[in-house]
């Protein structure tokens, strides 16, 4: 059964204050082409580059940004590398979820003291623009969290990067910030990682869903949403549940080769304009049956948007006690059926679209059936 528990006082006792998501680093087969894709399809703007020309001998990275969403696309420059092995096992995917903090050393000490496995000892990096301190811990699968302290840095991104100013630029698509990031973990591992975020990072459980909430005639999954003290960082964690056929979580685990980030939810202030822009630029979205919209007004009440417009775009709507939200999901953006994006607009609602779960997961199952993996 769904439970909802917003902890308003968590920030007062938060031992790991987070300012938000600093960046997401994806290990990809071709960083230059991936950067071009996110520029062209999603409207990200070019920011920075690191590679041979900046003294990097083992990797090349491109940084793109839209609103507060910063993506780092990284590829190896040689075979037999850790980055290459990550790509061999997982395909293109999120390696680093970097969190913006005021004190990266303290963040490392607090989390490792509570049981986190160290990934990066506090490290000071500097250039003519000042210095950054980064540290990091391991989380589920091969995903890591880096803590980034950049209060005394004025450079374009991080030391070791140079400004990237290509002539090719498209207008953005209205994307503002990372709303949440969803991690898929293995069978019976959800509670383990919920406990990790609670004990090690001081997160609170915001919402939980069981297989009665998230199921269709064929598949099911379990989910718990963890949030930091000020609510700026939210991590839903999914695990498979028993069903008649292979769930989307099982498909993800099979093709990703283990736990990892399943999707990145990015916020917009105008989902209609954003989806129109993304669709015109080639982004493909999951579709739901037209009948989803037949009784939408009865289910969600009065909304500002025209239902005919939402129907034409495939945008879903759900309401909670605080208001309503609009959301839509892309098809996977990588060759493997793993990483995808959610576009979300919140009009007061703080929930995650429980009323859309059945329609959404049936849409995912139709895609699974086409891939022959259901």
Image (tube, rainbow, N blue to C red):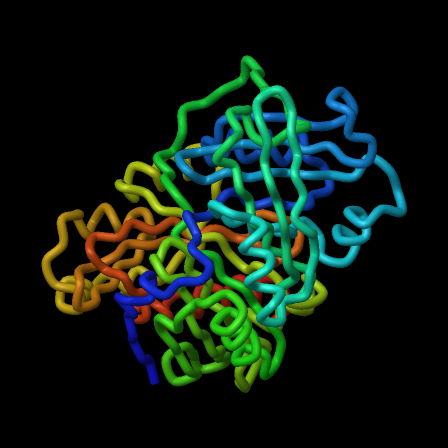
**Residue at the extreme right of the image, as rendered:** 80
Q: Is residue 61 above or below residue 351?
A: above
Which quarter of the figure is the N terminus placed in? bottom left
Q: Residue at x 55, y 39 (%)?
A: 71
Task: Answer yes or no: is residue 154 visible.
Answer: yes
Q: Residue at x 27, y 61 (%)?
A: 350
**Residue at the extreme left of the image, as rendered:** 302
Specify whether 210 is left or right of 93. left
**Residue at the extreme top of the image, as rendered:** 167
Q: Position of residue 18 (x, y in %)?
A: 44, 52
Front one among 32 and 236: 236
Q: Residue at x 51, y 73 (%)?
A: 199
Q: Position of residue 96 (x, y in %)?
A: 62, 50
Front one among 9 and 238: 9
Specify whether 29 is left or right of 341. right
Count of marks, rendered view: 0
Front one among 114 and 179: 114
Picture quadrant of residue 140: bottom right
Q: Is residue 273 above or below residue 81?
A: above
Picture quadrant of residue 128: top right
Q: Position of residue 205 (x, y in %)?
A: 39, 73
Q: Position of residue 145 (x, y in %)?
A: 59, 55
Specify whether 105 is left or right of 285. right
Q: Is residue 112 above or below residue 250?
A: above
Picture quadrant of residue 119: bottom right
Q: Residue at x 58, y 83 (%)?
A: 188
Specify whether 77 is left or right of 49. right
Which quarter of the figure is the C terminus placed in? bottom right
Task: Answer yes or no: is residue 353 visible.
Answer: no
């Amino acid at each position: 059964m769904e439970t909802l528990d917003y902890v308003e006082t968590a920030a007062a006792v938060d031992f790991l204050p987070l300012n938000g998501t600093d960046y997401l680093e994806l290990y990809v087969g071709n960083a230059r082409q991936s950067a071009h894709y996110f520029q062209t399809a999603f409207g990200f703007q070019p920011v920075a580059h690191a590679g041979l020309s900046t003294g990097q001998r083992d990797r090349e990275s491109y940084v793109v940004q839209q609103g507060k969403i910063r993506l780092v696309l990284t590829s190896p420059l040689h075979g037999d590398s850790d980055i290459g092995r990550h790509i061999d096992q997982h395909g293109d995917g999120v390696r680093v979820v970097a969190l913006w903090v005021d004190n990266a050393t303290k963040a490392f000490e607090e989390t490792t003291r509570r049981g986190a496995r160290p990934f990066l000892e506090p490290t000071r990096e500097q250039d003519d623009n000042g210095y950054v301190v980064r540290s990091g811990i391991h989380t589920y699968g091969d995903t890591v969290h880096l803590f980034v302290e950049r209060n005394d840095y004025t450079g374009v991104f991080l030391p070791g990067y140079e400004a990237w100013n290509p002539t090719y630029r498209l207008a953005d698509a209205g994307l503002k910030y990372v709303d949440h990031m969803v991690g898929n973990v293995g069978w019976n591992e959800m509670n383990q990682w919920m406990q990790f975020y609670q004990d090690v990072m001081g997160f609170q459980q915001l919402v939980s869903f069981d297989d009665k909430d998230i199921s269709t005639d064929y598949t099911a999954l379990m989910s718990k949403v963890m949030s930091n003290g000020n609510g700026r960082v939210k991590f839903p964690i999914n695990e498979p549940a028993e069903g008649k056929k292979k769930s989307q979580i099982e498909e993800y685990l099979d093709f990703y080769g283990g736990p990892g980030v399943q999707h990145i939810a990015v916020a917009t202030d105008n989902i209609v304009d954003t989806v129109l822009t993304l669709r015109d630029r080639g982004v493909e979205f999951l579709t739901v049956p037209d009948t989803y919209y037949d009784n939408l007004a009865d289910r969600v009440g009065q909304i500002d948007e025209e239902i005919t417009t939402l129907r034409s775009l495939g945008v879903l709507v759900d309401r909670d006690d605080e208001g309503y939200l609009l959301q839509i999901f892309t098809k996977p953006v990588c060759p493997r059926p793993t990483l995808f994006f959610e576009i979300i607009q919140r009009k007061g609602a703080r929930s995650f679209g429980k009323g859309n779960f059945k329609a959404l997961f049936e849409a995912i199952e139709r895609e699974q059936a086409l891939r022959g993996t259901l």
